[in-house]
Image: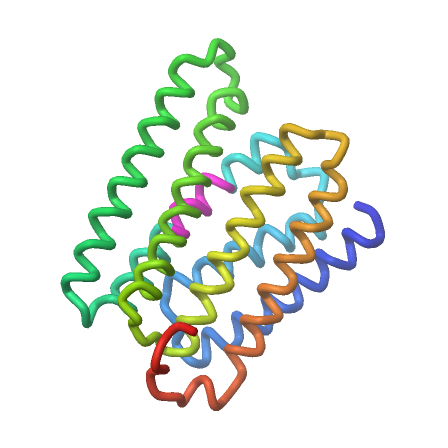
């Protein structure tokens, strides 16, 4: 790692520890805590033993993380839309359609790919899974905006931060895999945006007013 990348990773790891402490103390959703701990473990591995991070290990990490993100999506959907049965039902079937379509595209892409190595099979599947997860989080955010559903401040921070980050993550991952000449710049952009998301979460998690606030009038 370059000194700048090392500093960014260390900063991300420190902020994750801060957010995990708040999540543990204030009983955030279990799925969110699992996401934070998974991220902290992976960043710790990068910082301590970068040579262990191969393409295959990275893809397996992404597959496991996709499962945690879907768990978090379901938990946020239940917490945010649970009091609005019609909106919740619409979100569930629309998200289900998105995920089924993306899963079909992932399996179809892998099935017709001539190279049978693990990385060659999983990589195309990962792309579609990544798109589907990002679209599903965007759908949840759009549902809240459309129906003007109030969101508890901490869950608002989780949803807004993760939805924005996943969009950037999709873009930077595409650049890294398709435009190698811009991969370094894309990596720095990704790390910087991830750091900003963690700063936002840290402020939201440790803000006493946010923690004790009543439901806000709308997501905005």
Which of the 4 image quarters holds residue 156?
bottom left
Q: Is residue 102 above or below residue 72?
A: above
Instruction: Give the percent coordinates (x, y) of residue 131.
Output: 44, 40
Q: Is residue 165 above or below residue 121?
A: below
Name the foreground residue: 186 vs 39: 186
Q: On the rendered structure, is 95 left or right of 175?
A: left
Residue displayed at 45% across by 75% down: 24
Q: On the rendered structure, is 168 left or right of 135?
A: right
Magenta segment, prevailing SS (helix, strand or loop) = helix
Instruction: Give the percent coordinates (x, y) of residue 184.
Output: 76, 40
Count of labels in the image: 0
Boundaries of the magenta span? 62-69
Q: On the rendered structure, is 74 left or right of 207?
A: left
Name the foreground residue: 43 vs 121: 121
Q: Is residue 63 magenta?
A: yes
Instruction: Give the percent coordinates (x, y) of residue 23.
Output: 46, 74
Residue displayed at 29% across by 56% down: 74
Residue displayed at 34% across by 81% down: 217
View extreme (front): residue: 146
Residue displayed at 74% across by 36% down: 182
View extreme (right): residue: 3
């Amino acid at each position: 790692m370059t000194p700048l990348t090392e500093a960014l990773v260390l900063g991300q790891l420190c902020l994750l520890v801060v957010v995990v402490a708040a999540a543990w103390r204030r009983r955030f959703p279990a799925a969110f805590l699992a996401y934070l701990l998974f991220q902290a473990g992976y960043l710790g591995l990068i910082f301590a033993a970068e040579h262990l991070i191969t393409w295959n290990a990275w893809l397996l990490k992404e597959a496991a993380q996709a499962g945690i993100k879907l768990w978090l999506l379901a938990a946020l959907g239940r917490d945010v839309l649970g009091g609005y049965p019609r909106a919740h039902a619409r979100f569930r079937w629309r998200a289900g359609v998105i995920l089924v379509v993306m899963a079909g595209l992932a399996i179809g892409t892998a099935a017709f790919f001539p190279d049978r190595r693990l990385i060659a099979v999983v990589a195309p599947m990962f792309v579609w899974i990544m798109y589907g997860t990002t679209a599903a989080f965007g759908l949840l955010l759009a549902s809240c905006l459309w129906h003007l559903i109030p969101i508890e401040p901490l869950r608002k921070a989780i949803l807004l931060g993760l939805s924005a980050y996943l969009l950037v993550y999709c873009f930077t991952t595409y650049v890294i895999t398709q435009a190698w000449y811009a991969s370094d710049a894309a990596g720095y952009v990704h790390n910087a945006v991830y750091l900003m998301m963690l700063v936002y979460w840290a402020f939201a998690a440790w803000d006493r007013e946010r923690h004790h606030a009543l439901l806000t009038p709308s997501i905005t």
